[in-house]
Image (cartoon, rainbow, N blue to C red):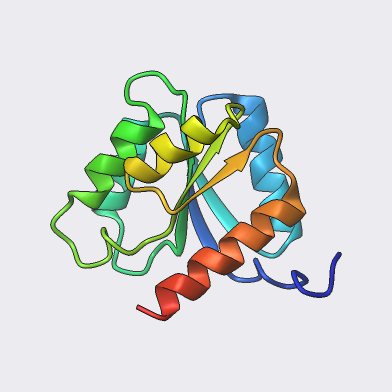
Amino acid sequence: PEPETAGILEGIRFLAAEDNEINAEILSELLEIEGASCEVVGNGRLAVERFREAGQDEFDAILMDVQMPVMNGHEAARAIRALPRSDAGTIPIIAMTANAFAEDEKAALDAGMDAHVAKPLDVEMLKKVIRKCVRRKESL
């Protein structure tokens, strides 16, 4: 691992919304290898409900697939940001999508997400993005 990102994910607790079971397994494994924990739900509505039910500071960040059934990632991010709890506006939400065009990144940011990571996931890139988002949250 690159020294600047070694240990970055250690102890971080993620909520992930991913409808593809194989992608969810791979994501969970990658995060566990890095020392993080991850709870996966199958669509955006479940992510909103799980975050709503979660205790304050139960999750450190949300990894949000963009294209999902029931409620897509953009809708879910907007719904999370609108929740009446203090961390709803500050928890880092990172879009994960195979759509890596500039307009896709803009749509994610417009929906209230903090960052955009292309699939297939590059763990080193994910760690750099998370480091920026978590650092930004700590400075709030």
In this rendering, would 84 be left or right of 109? Answer: left
Q: Can you give x and y, in whole percent of width and height, for residue 112 in the image?
A: 33, 48
Task: Pick out the residue farthest to the front.
Answer: 102
Residue 77 visible in the current orientation: yes
Compared with 22, 56 (above or below) is below
In this rendering, would 136 be left or right of 49? Answer: right
In this rendering, would 119 be left or right of 105? Answer: right
In this rendering, would 83 be left or right of 116? Answer: left
Q: Quadrant of residue 73?
A: top left
Compared with 50, 7 (above or below) is below
Compared with 126, 103 (above or below) is above
Q: Who is closer to the viewer here, 117 or 76? A: 117
Residue 17 visible in the current orientation: no
Q: Quadrant of the N terminus?
A: bottom right
Task: Pick out the residue farthest to the bottom.
Answer: 139
| Picture residue at 35% right of the left edge, 34% below the top | 74
| Picture residue at 55% right of the left edge, 38% below the top | 96
Task: Pick out the residue farthest to the right.
Answer: 1
Task: Pick out the residue farthest to the left.
Answer: 84
